[in-house]
Amino acid sequence: MLQLFGRAENVPGEGERRSPRVGGTGLRRRGTGTTRQHPAATEMAEDIYIVDDDEAVRASLCALFEAYGFTVHDFESGTEFLERYVPGMRGCMLLDINLPGMNGIQVLQAMAAMGSHLPVIVVTARGDSRTNADAMGAGAIAFLQKPFGSGHLVGLVQDALLRH
């Protein structure tokens, strides 16, 4: 079970794997500078980019997507992500709105200005209809308010990867 934003969720255990429809091979946690290979990985990875200033949220999301066999890159700010962004990056981004420095909307706008086609799912604890509209208008493909179920999030990511 994984505790994700106040909810216990079933995720694959060691030796089990819920294969994402797009494949996956492991986890790269930027903070440790290491790459871990998921034991059941056999296919080319899709990258997940997590941008959230809350370390516990990033750790939970990294663990969730590693369990599904994705390669995960985590960033504590939008500025940090944009410093490492390369046009043409493939995968899916999970982006918090309330970030230090540049907020999530500003990150979306900067990515659009660079011609990014990376699908972005906005996740936030403090969402309202205006923030939702701003995020979607700036290019987000979905808007989730915390807490949310891990299965729902994984499904959104899988759909985004298939469509983009």
Image (cartoon, grey):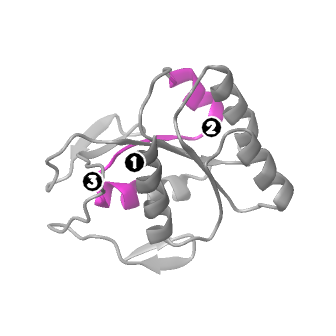
Q: Is residue 152 visible?
A: yes
Q: Report the mark closest to the observer, 3 or 2.
A: 3
- Give the SS element for disc 1: helix
The segment highlighted magenta reads 62-85
- Mark-to-mark CA distance, 3 and 2: 24 Å
Q: Earlier in the sequence, mark 3 or mark 2?
A: 3
Quadrant for the N terminus in the image: bottom left
**What kind of residue is marked 2?**
Ser
Q: Nearer the viewer, residue 44 or 162?
A: 162
Residue reaching furthest to the right: 130
**Type of the residue with mark 3:** Gly
Q: Which mark is residue 69?
A: 3
Residue 30 spot, x, y in % from top left: 41, 37
- Expressed as whole percent of the image width and height from the top left, the position of residue 118 reads 52, 35
Q: Which mark is residue 162?
A: 1
Q: Going by the image, does 5 lie left or right of 86?
A: right
